[in-house]
Image (spheres, rainbow, N blue to C red):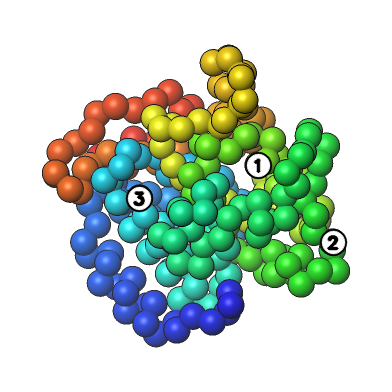
Amino acid sequence: MEHDYNVEVLQAEVAMAIESFNDGQRATYNGVIDAYAAHHAKVIFIDGPGGTSKTYTKNLILNVVRSCGDIALVVASLGIATLLLLGGRTAHSYLKISIAFDRKSICCIRKQDDLAALIRQTKLILWDEAPMTNKLAFEVVDRTLHDLTYRKEPFGSIVFIMSGDFRQVLPVIPQGSRANIISTSIKNSYLWESVEVFCLSKNMQTSDVVAIHPDLGNHTFVD
């Protein structure tokens, strides 16, 4: 399935869509595609409230990678979110993340599995609704990709894109305190030190600019 895309159709869609970008979308697009084109290990977070066309931008990025004949894997923390992204699947199911995991766990993927071979060919992974997921799940994937690709860079040197809105739902911790919940956020993982953040702020539904930005670390602010 990851190879079953019509390259010519995708290329035409990309050419048309780029012309409609606002500054924020263009900066986000360029940040991701530059890393992909340079084969540069990079971890990016695409932040923005609803209405800022995050999904539109992410689907275009996926089209670019796939139109070049390369593999882009798409997962999401919620099943419903997978319906909005081309080829999307739930993260736990597709990446075989165990329901119970800890700081030493890895995904249930053997090196001889077809999925392992696919991952070694993958140029970009996109994880939607990332703020909802416990940081340990990302660390599980990071360790697994190190093991499968034999590379020590974050996420096995695969361009890794996370997206979502920290203003919405954070990880759910049964009977957990505010401190417990915050401590499980991806922002409190060792991985966050490697993240570059792009913020989409222009509401494409009302054409207003949303000026609220959370404290996300190394920001690249765009309107």
Amino acid at dot 2 = Arg
Disc 3 designates what residue?
Answer: 54
Question: Residue at 41% of width from left, 37% of height from top?
Answer: 165
Picture coordinates of residue 218, whole percent (x, y): 47, 30
Residue at 32% from the left image edge and 38% from the top image edge: 49
Q: CA distance from mark 1 to mark 3?
A: 21 Å
Q: In the rendering, at what x and y percent does residue 196 appear?
A: 49, 39
Judging by the rendered image, the residue that carries numbered circle 1 is 138
Among the two numbered marks 1 and 3 on one chain, the one whose residue lies closer to the N terminus? 3
Q: How many marks?
A: 3
What separation in Å lies between label 2 and label 1 (alpha carbons)? 18 Å
Name which residue lies at 45% across and 67% down: 86
Q: Which mark is residue 38?
A: none
Do the residues bearing badges 1 and 3 touch, measured as CB atoms within 8 Å? Answer: no
Q: Position of residue 4 (x, y in %)?
A: 54, 82
Secondary structure category for the residue under label 3: helix
Of the 4 image quadrants, the one containing the C terminus is top left
Residue 161 visible in the shown view: no
Q: Which is more toward the observer, 193 or 49?
A: 49
**Of helix, strand and loop, which one carries label 2?**
loop
Mark 2 vs 1, N-terminal side: 2
Hey, which quadrant is residue 220 in on the image?
top left
Mark 2 or mark 3: whose residue is earlier in sequence: 3
Q: Are marks 2 and 3 in contact (CB under 8 Å)?
A: no
Q: Nearer the viewer, residue 46 or 1?
A: 1
Which residue type does callout 3 highlight?
Answer: Lys
